[in-house]
Image: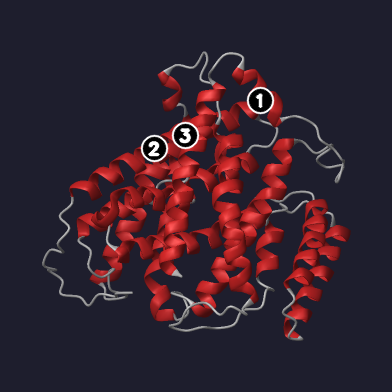
Amino acid sequence: MTRAFLHGEAAGGIVLMAAAALAMLVANVPHWSEAYFHMLHFVTGPVISPRYGPMTLHLWINDAAMAVFFLLVGLEIKREFVDGRLNSWERRRLPVLAAAAGMAVPALFYLGVTRAYPELHGGWAIPAATDIAFAIGVLAILGPRAPTSLKLFLTTVAIVDDMGAVAIIAVGYTEGIDFAALAGAGIVLAAMFALNRAGSQRLIVYLLLAVLLWYFVFLSGVHATIAGVAAAMTIPIVKTPAAPDAAHSPLHRLEHGLHPWSAFLIVPLFGFANAGVSLAGLSPAILLAPLPLGIALGLFAGKQLGILGAIWLAVRTRFAPRPGGATWLQIYGVSLLAGIGFTMSLFIGGLAFPGRPELVDEVKIGVLTGSVLSALVGFAVLRFAPIRPMPDPLGENRITD
């Protein structure tokens, strides 16, 4: 299961890179760019919520299709905590600490750069996220030069990171709650939990209720993608410790069914719809503007310092051992790759500055700059790092998967 997951994430990450590159190309070619931006804002209807008006293609992608992506994220989180690499506190300690530091330090970098611009402070969470598909895609290109233990560690950190991002979206980017709609969502969610407790394993019933849950959450003012994560928590799971996934486990079946659609359609489609930014009339000086600079520094410098520093501190204090079979230089390279924020950073950027397209464009520039820097430098470090583990001066034990 783990090998298949990593292979799927790697291939999906490569497709995502291609989609992002295509978006940048199309957005900067005359005639194509006009068609590209017109297509994204094409009104399809209907009006589901007066708050958002008629549904556009961009809204369908960001609020509906991405809810399926977040459903998959929720399934992965539940599986890891119930039946995976995060099923005990001993295994959670290092990734939880690394992910927490990897979110807090980039946010501090961002706030430090934008401290004189209060109108930009709402974007503090943009550099806090890690794009697991993109990062694993880079690791896949490296092949055996990246130890499997580090691939698993990065995946685990990204899953914990996703939990933090979901909490941030739910709490930090929600305004004007419609409590009647929220109550409706609560009733649907309670019904799904009741089905779970009653032992029902009919996926079709859960999925139909998940659509209804999405509708109420969309109306409520809480971002609709949260419905995906909430629904995932209700899907029954059959534990299969140290064994392949159970064929009769609803959660595993749904996760396997959704993964190809998410990796090869939904996430690349999101990347194509959100990475395109026109560079016409912009000078290189835009990179030094507070918003893009804060995001780029947060992703490139903040992520590596936060994650590497957390691992070093955990090992030094014997709070947790470092990943097995990896040198400190390789760990540093993976800490750099965690600075690839792409999908989640772009997503949060759109939430942080609604109705401010000029700022969203600056967000895209900052995210692309920080992510590309992190990818290139992280790739270079891992490409030239010795494969054979070096002697460990601290003499700590190591975890192997």
Query: What residue is disc 2 on?
Result: 372
How far apart in space, not on screen, are marks 1 and 3 (Cα)? 20 Å
- Seen at 60% across and 41% down, the residue is 269
Query: What residue is disc 3 on?
Result: 366
- Seen at 66% across and 21% down, the residue is 35
- Report the side of 27 relative to 241 (left or right): right
Q: Which amino acid, by three-letter code, is at mark 1?
A: Phe
Name which of mark 1 and mark 2 comes first in the sequence. Answer: 1
- Badge 2 density bin: few <14, some 14–19, many ≥20, Cα 10 Å: many
The percent coordinates of residue 38 (x first, y second) are 70, 24
- Badge 3 density bin: few <14, some 14–19, many ≥20, Cα 10 Å: many
Per the image, label 1 sits on a secondary structure element best described as helix
Q: Quadrant of residue 59?
A: top right
Asked if one can make out residue 114 in the rendered structure from this viewpoint, the answer is no
The percent coordinates of residue 173 (x first, y second) are 66, 49
Q: Which amino acid, by three-letter code, is at mark 3?
A: Gly
Q: Quadrant of residue 397?
A: bottom left
The percent coordinates of residue 174 (x first, y second) are 71, 51
Per the image, label 2 sits on a secondary structure element best described as helix
| Front-lying residue, 31 or 156 | 31
Q: Which amino acid, by three-letter code, is at mark 2?
A: Val
